[in-house]
Image (tube, rainbow, N blue to C red):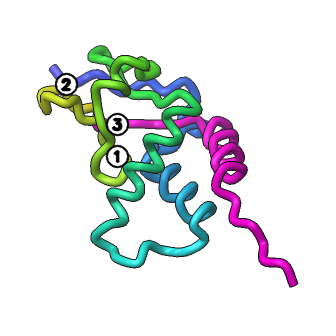
Amino acid sequence: MGAAAAVWPDSAEFIPLSSGALIAYYNIAGTASTSAGDLPKRLDAVAHAIASLVPIYTLDEGGLLRPLTKLELALSEFAGGGSMLVHRDRDLVHADLRIQRRDLLDALHALQDVYRRPTPSP
């Protein structure tokens, strides 16, 4: 018997969190990381910031979409450039993290307001 297929309400409205973190990073920083080696850690931090603002979704054991709980987020850390949420005891890993496109836009606007670089005066 095969595994249950993932059930996303409208898959066109969801993108991988790692992609959302990359979009947000480039929109805020305006440039690539100085070192390719530290980019995943920066994206993990961006994923954490996004998760503090909007819901992040994963699949439950039955293959149904569900939002991560505040407790799951508090007891875990993002890894792999925002592609995984790893529990502190390393036994539980959520690897199929998604964000709604409209939520990403909301988070991006909020993060841009916080990290907006002041323009130099002439």
Nearer the observer, 81 or 1: 81
Q: Position of residue 19 (x, y in %)?
A: 48, 53
| Rendering quarter of residue 5 | top left
Q: Which range of residues does the magenta coloring cover? A: 95-122
Q: Which residue lies under the disc numbered 1?
A: 83
Residue count near mark 1 (Cα–Cα under 10 Å), binned few <14, some 14–19, many ≥20: many
Q: Which residue lies under the disc numbered 2?
A: 2
108 inside magenta stretch: yes
Q: Which residue lies under the disc numbered 3?
A: 96
Residue 49 is tagged as: none
Residue count near mark 3 (Cα–Cα under 10 Å), binned few <14, some 14–19, many ≥20: some
| Rendering quarter of residue 58 | top left
Q: Name the front one of labels 1 and 2.
A: 1
Label 1 to label 3, Cα distance in Å? 7 Å
Q: Position of residue 69 (x, y in %)?
A: 41, 18
> Which of the marked residues, 1 or 2, is nearer the chain's N terminus?
2
Helix or strand or loop: what does disc 1 sit on? loop
Q: Position of residue 122 (x, y in %)?
A: 87, 84
Helix or strand or loop: what does disc 3 sit on? loop
Q: Name the front one of labels 1 and 3.
A: 1
